[in-house]
Image: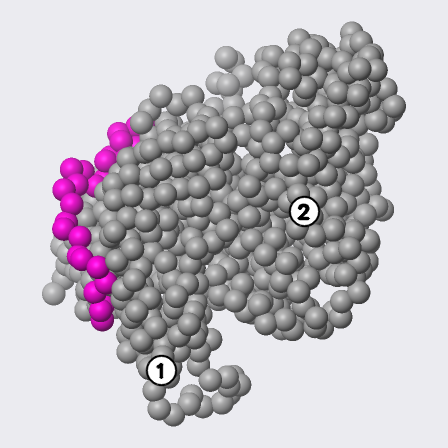
């Protein structure tokens, strides 16, 4: 019993955040510049557009041992490439539903829209995602062990 | 050769005794215990470990998958190494530490499956992994009593009552069993199993009689030895350019069912997997049906078309392999016929090949 | 053979013979009898006399649309990669199509894999195809030597048994819940159109799984795919899978490991299903082809349900309706976003800006 509680204390969720170059990445920047506090559990990967996110990449993150994934892009209508996030929205909706249907815990995979002006919102989302993933515990499903 | 007489209780005791020091595998029905209406319903027998006194299905029919996975596992780890920073042994390939060294006994192996081990031994003769797996695995075969509609072992040089590749060959006679102890490994198993009596002369003659009767069930469309010689004598290019390949390719979907479920398909690929700071080099099944099988680094693919890939499987089995090693690379188990979703029948292909002038 | 099937078979033979001998089509794609009962062999008739070998019955489970892109290429006059396309119309191909297959052809037309003007489609109203595995389960996995199909029953014979079973009891799950048995596009109708069936709940199986907990669903998924041998028959039997290089064959980066590790197999099945999102017509070819009895159809059925609920479309019903994942609406539902839970600090994201 002691051992598990110690382990839980030591364990910190590792969350991969795929942020779109034009909005969410700038939003993360603003959060930093504005000194908004958010948990240090995210590792940011900058992508050109949320429409670039293929499910292959999301599953690869989970397979490689990420405890959670956050994908964030521009608000609908604000996409630098006009419609990238609108296509992405359909894909994410379907994909999230599919993997939860197949037994991946809801909360491992998170999506949001954060604009370049929403530094505070970014901090809030990261906090929420971290809490959700922490509540779920370390990712086991889909993690490859050899 | 020693011949023993066994009752079912003797067999059960053997399995239990062997399981004390070895892993005993046998064909078990793969039905699900799930009571939900969305059940995982798999109504076939397949290889599974025999635990808690479970008795394998030794009746008719073949288990779904061949026994090659015990000798040529999917995947086999060849080497492992660390790629961690600061590890003095980083990038030094080593024998895997947790290699599966358990001794295994396979019970209820059909003569075709047992023979496949002998055939695979030809290309894998100097392969240390195959040989190590072979050394630690004993085969307790069960000779056939009935013929499935997809059986054709006799046409490719096997026999429904053959003992090739087995350590012990068990034959069921009415209500008791006869066990022929063939190898030293088999002898060792008999010692461990314990308590079986030598068969009487009358029982041995009954065994012979029963075997001859089963053999007569399996008529062959051609003399297997003659067919083999004929195939070896045929011109490679005449076979290669035969017109029927394109018709075969018309219906083939190029999946890997036939190769993965074939006991004698042994092609593999090797790759390095990196997972969390550990590299492992694995050997896993590959199939000549897949375009990637022959894709070269330059981007050129010598077997880029479906018809070329379909042809390769049969040419390998019936021409390339006999030319190189002697026998056909086929034991006639009929799994590829039974499982093929588009009913490509290897017997028809063999017939077509033999008809090529 | 039942009268329905024999009438259809006769019609197919006559029409195929006429199309081939008049030279309207270069090849005709149908089914012929194989060497085993309950397994039909897809067959390409290239000469008028081949048409006599065409057969139709309840075991024609392979989706013929699967063969079309390759078959169309194969009847074109040979040319090098840099040669210009030949002048004049290219040769045509004749094909049988039931409801789901015709919808797959529509999807292939939308995705530029086949050209409508190069196809002569013989439409057949499908009475539902029989699942060979269900028949085998009825006789405890014993061998079936012969099967004789009547109008509403099947008589099967094997070692020591002869049994009559109701056809509908062994019809495939996807056919039992099918509401589009008649082809959506065709040039000629063969046999009679099937009157639409009453299907109580076409997503019953999906709903049952959805009702389970996350852990239960995961263990169901893992148990289902644990016997997967990665032969890719499900992929290759699928008319939607025509990519020259599949994601499983990618090596840089490698998305899916090659061996039968459960994590890799899970990822393979998730991605394979996902690639069919909004395109799958629930034809059941994947499940029929699977040698290990995995019900991978349920994964794509869930996608079908989601797409219908979220975007109101069904794949391949109308060539003019774009495929759901190749289009968008500005007010698409987005309640899956985490921001819905956190709440918005600014007005951005409240609907859509003009």
Front residue of this view, candidates C58 and C256: C58
Name the residue at 48% across, 28% down.
C160
In the picture provided, is C189 more to the left or to the right than A94? Answer: left
Q: Residues within 10 Å of mark 2 (few under 14, many from 20)?
A: some
Q: Residue at 44% of width from left, 81% of height from top?
A: C76
Magenta part, dominant SS: loop
Residue closest to the eye, B184 or B164 = B164
Occupied quadrant, residue C252: bottom right
Q: Secondary structure at mark 1?
A: loop
Q: Which residue is mark 2?
A: B220
Q: Chain of mark 2?
A: B
Q: Position of residue C37 (x, y in %)?
A: 45, 45
Seen from the viewer's position, the closer of residues B332 and A64 is: B332
| Dots 2 and 1 on the same chain | no
Instruction: For residue B147, say whether it is visible.
Output: yes
Q: Secondary structure at mark 2?
A: loop
Determine the residue located farthest toward the left in the rendered image.
C354
Q: Is residue B171 above or below residue A127?
A: above
Which residue lies at the image location 66% right of the left edge and 40% below the top edge?
B218
- Magenta residue check for C195: yes
Residue A140: tell me if it is visible.
Answer: no
Q: Looking at the image, is B237 positioned above or below residue B39?
A: below
Residue on which disc 1 sits: C23
Q: Is residue B158 left or right of residue C130?
A: right
Give the magenta-colored segment's residue range: C186-214
Query: At 72% across and 23% down in the image, what residue appears?
Result: B170
């Amino acid at each position: 019993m002691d051992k598990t509680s110690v382990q839980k204390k030591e364990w910190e969720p590792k969350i991969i955040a795929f942020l779109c170059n034009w909005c969410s990445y700038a939003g993360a920047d603003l959060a930093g510049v504005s000194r908004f506090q958010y948990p240090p559990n995210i590792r940011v990967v900058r992508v050109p557009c949320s429409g670039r996110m293929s499910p292959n990449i999301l599953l690869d993150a989970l397979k490689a041992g990420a405890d959670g994934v956050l994908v964030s892009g521009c608000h609908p209508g604000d996409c630098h490439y006009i419609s990238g996030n609108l296509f992405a929205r359909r894909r994410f909706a379907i994909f999230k539903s599919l993997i939860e249907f197949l037994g991946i815990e809801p909360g491992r995979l998170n999506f949001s829209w954060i604009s370049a002006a929403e530094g505070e919102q970014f901090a809030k989302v990261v906090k929420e995602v971290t809490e959700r993933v922490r509540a779920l515990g370390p990712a086991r499903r889909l993690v490859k062990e050899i | 050769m020693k011949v023993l007489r066994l009752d079912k209780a003797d067999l059960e005791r053997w399995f239990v005794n062997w399981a004390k020091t070895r892993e005993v595998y046998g064909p078990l029905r793969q039905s699900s215990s799930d009571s939900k209406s969305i059940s995982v319903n798999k109504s076939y027998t397949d290889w599974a470990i025999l635990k808690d006194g479970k008795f394998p299905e030794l009746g008719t029919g073949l288990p779904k998958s061949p026994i090659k996975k015990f000798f040529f596992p999917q995947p086999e780890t060849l080497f492992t190494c660390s790629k961690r920073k600061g590890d003095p042994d980083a990038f030094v390939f080593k024998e895997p530490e947790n290699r599966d060294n358990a001794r295994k006994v396979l019970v209820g192996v059909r003569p075709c499956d047992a023979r496949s081990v002998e055939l695979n031994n030809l290309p894998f003769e100097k392969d240390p992994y195959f040989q190590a797996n072979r050394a630690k695995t004993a085969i307790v075969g069960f000779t056939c009593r009935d013929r499935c509609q997809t059986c054709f072992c006799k046409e490719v040089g096997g026999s429904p009552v053959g003992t090739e590749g087995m350590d012990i060959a068990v034959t069921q006679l009415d209500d008791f069993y006869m066990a022929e102890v063939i190898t030293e490994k088999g002898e060792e198993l008999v010692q461990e199993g314990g308590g079986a009596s030598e068969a009487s002369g009358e029982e041995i003659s009954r065994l012979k009689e029963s075997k001859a009767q089963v053999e007569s069930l399996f008529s062959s469309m051609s003399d297997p030895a003659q067919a083999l010689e004929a195939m070896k004598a045929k011109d490679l290019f005449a076979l290669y350019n035969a017109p029927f390949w394109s018709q075969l390719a018309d219906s083939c979907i190029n999946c890997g069912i036939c190769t993965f479920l074939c006991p004698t398909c042994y092609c593999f690929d090797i790759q390095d997997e990196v997972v969390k700071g550990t590299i492992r080099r694995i050997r896993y099944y590959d199939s000549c049906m897949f375009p990637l099988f022959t894709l070269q680094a330059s981007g050129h693919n010598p077997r880029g078309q479906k018809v070329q890939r379909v042809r390769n499987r049969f040419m390998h089995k019936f021409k390339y392999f006999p030319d190189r090693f002697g026998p056909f690379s086929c034991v006639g188990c009929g799994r590829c016929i039974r499982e093929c979703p588009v009913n490509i029948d290897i017997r028809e292909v063999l017939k077509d090949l033999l008809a090529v002038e | 053979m039942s009268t329905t099937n024999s009438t259809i078979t006769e019609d197919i033979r006559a029409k195929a013979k006429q199309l081939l001998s008049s030279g309207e089509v270069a090849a005709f794609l149908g089914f012929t009898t194989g060497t085993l009962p309950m397994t039909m062999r897809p067959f390409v008739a290239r000469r008028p006399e081949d048409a006599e070998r065409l057969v139709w019955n309840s075991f024609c489970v392979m989706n013929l649309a699967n063969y079309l892109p390759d078959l169309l290429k194969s009847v074109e006059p040979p040319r090098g990669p840099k040669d210009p396309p030949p002048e004049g119309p290219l040769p045509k191909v004749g094909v049988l199509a039931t409801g789901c297959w015709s919808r797959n052809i529509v999807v292939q037309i939308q995705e530029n894999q086949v050209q409508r003007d190069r196809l002569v489609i013989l439409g057949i109203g499908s009475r539902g195809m029989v699942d060979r595995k269900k028949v085998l389960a009825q006789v405890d996995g014993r061998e079936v030597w012969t099967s004789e199909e009547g109008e509403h029953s099947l008589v099967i014979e094997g070692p020591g048994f002869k049994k009559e079973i109701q056809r509908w009891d062994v019809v495939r799950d996807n056919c039992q819940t099918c509401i589009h048995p008649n082809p959506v596009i065709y040039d000629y109708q063969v046999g009679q159109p099937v009157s639409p069936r009453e299907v109580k709940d076409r997503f019953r199986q999906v709903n049952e799984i959805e009702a389970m907990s996350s852990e239960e669903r995961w263990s169901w998924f893992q148990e289902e795919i644990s016997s997967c041998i990665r032969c890719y028959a499900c992929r290759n039997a699928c008319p939607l899978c025509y990519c020259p290089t599949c994601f499983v064959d990618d090596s840089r980066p490698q998305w899916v490991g090659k061996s039968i590790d459960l994590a890799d197999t899970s990822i393979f099945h998730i991605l394979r299903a996902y690639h069919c999102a909004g395109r799958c017509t629930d034809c059941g070819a994947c499940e029929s082809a699977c040698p290990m009895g995995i019900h991978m159809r349920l994964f794509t059925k869930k996608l079908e349900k989601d797409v219908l609920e979220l975007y109101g479309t069904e794949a391949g019903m109308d060539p003019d309706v774009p495929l759901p994942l190749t289009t968008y609406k500005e007010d698409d539902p987005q309640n899956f976003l985490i921001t819905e839970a956190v709440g918005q600090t600014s007005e951005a994201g409240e609907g859509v800006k003009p």
